[in-house]
Amino acid sequence: MSTIIAPSILSANFARLADEIKKVEDAGAEYIHIDVMDGTYVPNITLGSPVVKSLRPYSKAVFDVHLMTEHPETHIKSFADAGADIITFHAEAARHSHRVVQQIHDAGCKAGVAINPGTSLSMIEELVEDVEMVLIMTVNPGFGGQKFIESMLGKIHMLYHMIREMETECDIEVDGGINAETSVLVREAGANVLVAGSAIYCAPDIAQAIKDIRGKEIVHHHD
């Protein structure tokens, strides 16, 4: 499975977002990771669907919208209408996760479910066959530029095996502290969609940074 790079615009210059998206797209990124924070589920507030809508005409990349919000079901339609391709919500923030997945699909988007470092995989086991992506947070959400939590590698590996045992297709995305070094670890554990913010946007050469994070292809011997 080839690696997909999803630069997080959380680390971009918000005054020049369209240019910042074009920059990473031209440098080889397939996805644009859009962190939506509501100030309640996580401490910060970032941006809403009007910003996504205004950016959509400037980009052909996949808009990977990550809802770090309470009541995610209330935001699905507006982000789908704004041009989101994938909408990921937090299992911890949803009362009825399965219904949220259905609502995302009904809105015409791919569905992703995210879990925080302190949340067990058992919370999403019943959803894995219904979603297109599972996002394992490798930092606690709410701020950019945090240090990668290495104990999450076991969780990624367990999820990788869970997906294989269910004989389903599902991307594994990781978000938090991803750079050229940690990329190797998460890809070896089974992740194939890598969110990186400061490691890309703060790099002197963005194309090289994306290349370094993508790394060499890893062959999984299915033990």
Image (cartoon, grey):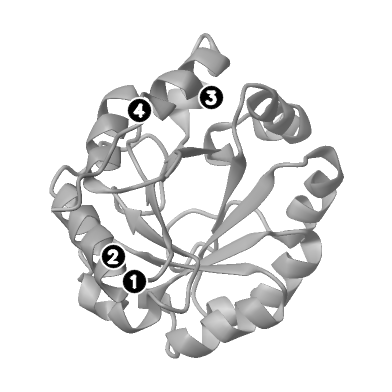
Q: Position of residue 34 (x, y in %)?
A: 59, 49
Q: Which mark is residue 179?
A: 4
Residue under circle 2? 164
Please report contact status of discs 3 and 4: CB closer than 8 Å, yes or no: no
Position of the N terminus, as image quadrant, is top left
Give residue 21's quadrant in the image: top right
Q: Which mark is residue 201?
A: 3
Give residue 161's quadrant in the image: bottom left
Mark 4 residue type: Asn
Give residue 92's quadrant in the image: bottom left
Residue under circle 1? 167
Question: Which residue appears at 31% of the width and 67% of the height?
Answer: 163
Q: Position of residue 8 (x, y in %)?
A: 53, 40
Residues at marks 2 and 1, CA–CA distance in whole angstroms: 5 Å
The tag earlier along the polypeptide, 2 or 3, is: 2
Q: Is residue 211 above or below residue 8?
A: above
Question: Which residue appears at 59% of the width and 65% of the height?
Answer: 87
